[in-house]
Amino acid sequence: MSLPPPGTSGLPMVHTSGIPADVLNAITRRVYDEMPIHLIYIPEFRLMDRMAVREHVEAMLTKNAGLVEQLPRQQRNNHGHDPRGLALGRLVEARTRYAILSHRWLNREPTYSEMLQAPDSAQRPGSPGYEKLQRFCSVAAHLGIDFAWTDTCCIDKGSSSELDESIRSMYRWYHNAAICIVYFADTTSLEDLPHDEWFTRGWTLQELLAPRRVKCFGRGWVPLTSAQADIDKDTAAAGGVRKFVSTPLLQHLASGAGIRVEDMMSYSPGPTDVPKRMAWAARRTTTRGEDRAYCLMGMFGVSIPTAYGEGPDLAFFRLVEAIIQVSNDPAILDWIGSPAATSHPTRMVPSSPGCYLGRITRDEEETVLFGEEPLVLTNKGLRMEMFIVRVPDIRFARDIDKSGTRAIFPCRSEWFVEREVHVDTGGTHKFILEEAYAIGIWGCRGTRAARYFACILASPLDPKSSLKYWAKVEEHTNYILLTPSEKFRSYLNAKHRQGDLQLETVYL
């Protein structure tokens, strides 16, 4: 008599603890892959690490063996259905629910070491930070939740590896929480809400977008609404169709964040809509400059190592580099301002999210570069394909001063939105040969329309030789971006459809 293949029928293997092996594996995956490194166990108001949480859940299921015995016996079948796996996932998630706090730091916040040294809450000195923590845990307990997490005392900031993992995992932890409790310390009414300082902090942006369920409290822990949850994305997406009611609270949240309600409720992390999403973070601040980049990793679905001390420009450069590696959307280069100050030769990467303000020009549709070559950062610069239009071809005249460092480029109005561009390079570049200048145009094709961007280029080589290597013309450290007119876009679209859009690979 032969035994059936593992996982096709019969009961799973049973561990020495009395719990089936698949249940133990599900607990381990949930605790180590989807939950924070440390959690507050609310009934005892003490910190637990992942091993302690796993042992706690195992002990609870051992004590309540009936919960495991009620799981379906059938595992994955030939049709891909896994009744036991689905039921097991729900069981483990229900026993590991945790609440997560979104807030603005106050004076005298509790620390990780203090939580370890004084497990009895009565021994802790009173302060606004401790009171906030206790009220947060009280709210979570009232909702029937045993675990809680906050960034003040649940991260061992003395451990660089734990801090790095926490920052990279933050978006996922907020998304996986049973509920996110948001405390608006400055808010006393819905009308006050958009002006709360919470909306000015960099980290709170992902804390608004990531959670599936949110409950909001104002000053003194007064609920801002009578609803059990002010945002419930799981309910809104029930049945595979996303529906939600735009309540006054949602409208005030959207107003304070500068985000449309629809974008807030349907947000999905990924390297799309870069200018729009960067603009949401443009006016937010962080205590450490590098955090302006680190706090956006989860929103764009990328991960970069943290390296405090590298400076905000290099941190943001690495974030944009990570987005470019997984995205082919040319709108990531649609910015104006200062390039990131790094040792890399490219000047096509911006220095901060603020460079994207006012650059939201795209329709919400999937777009790809019109060239065959992907965007790639190389040791020569950013490699990309451009449609190069020489200055004489578009009557792009120059008026240069005697020093050769200041120039006015009058543009034909029917080709560009700008009538003329004043460039003062501050002595970093000399305007000499007319033939050494051009307009570089890049863009994309979309489901409804194509979009194009353009910048002034200068050739650092003899124009009679290869014009493959260009330098982007800047005004001091500002990126000069042009906006092709409707007539020019129609011209480019026609050439593209006819296969007559001759692209050149350039390094910028």
Image: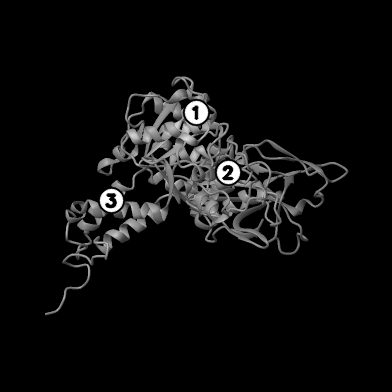
494 relative to 400 in the view: left or right: left
Look at the numbered discs 2 and 1 and tell me whether their residues touch, using CB distance below 8 Å.
Answer: no
Q: Can residue 334 be spotted in the picture?
A: no
Amino acid, disc 2: Phe
Identify the residue under disc 2: 488
Q: Position of residue 285 (x, y in %)?
A: 60, 36
Numbered circle sitting on residue 215: none
Of pointers 3 and 1, the one earlier in the residue sequence: 3
- Please state which amino acid type lies under the numbered disc 1: Gly
Asked if the residue at tag 2 contacts the one at tag 3, i.e. Cβ–Cβ closer than 8 Å, the answer is no
Q: Which residue is located at x 17 percent, y 53 percent?
A: 70
Where does residue 50 sit, x and y in percent of width and height?
41, 54
SS at badge 1:
helix
Q: In the image, residue 263 lies at what x, y percent?
A: 43, 37
Q: Alpha-carbon neighbours of circle 2 within 10 Å: few (<14), some, or many (≥20)?
A: some
Quadrant, the N terminus: bottom left
Q: In this rendering, which labeled residue sits more in front, label 3 or label 2?
A: 3
- x and y percent of residue 344 in the render? 69, 57
In the picture of the structure, the residue carrying the numbered disc 3 is 60
Q: From the image, tell me which residue sits under label 1.
A: 256
Residue farthest bottom in this picture? 1
Mark 3: secondary structure: helix
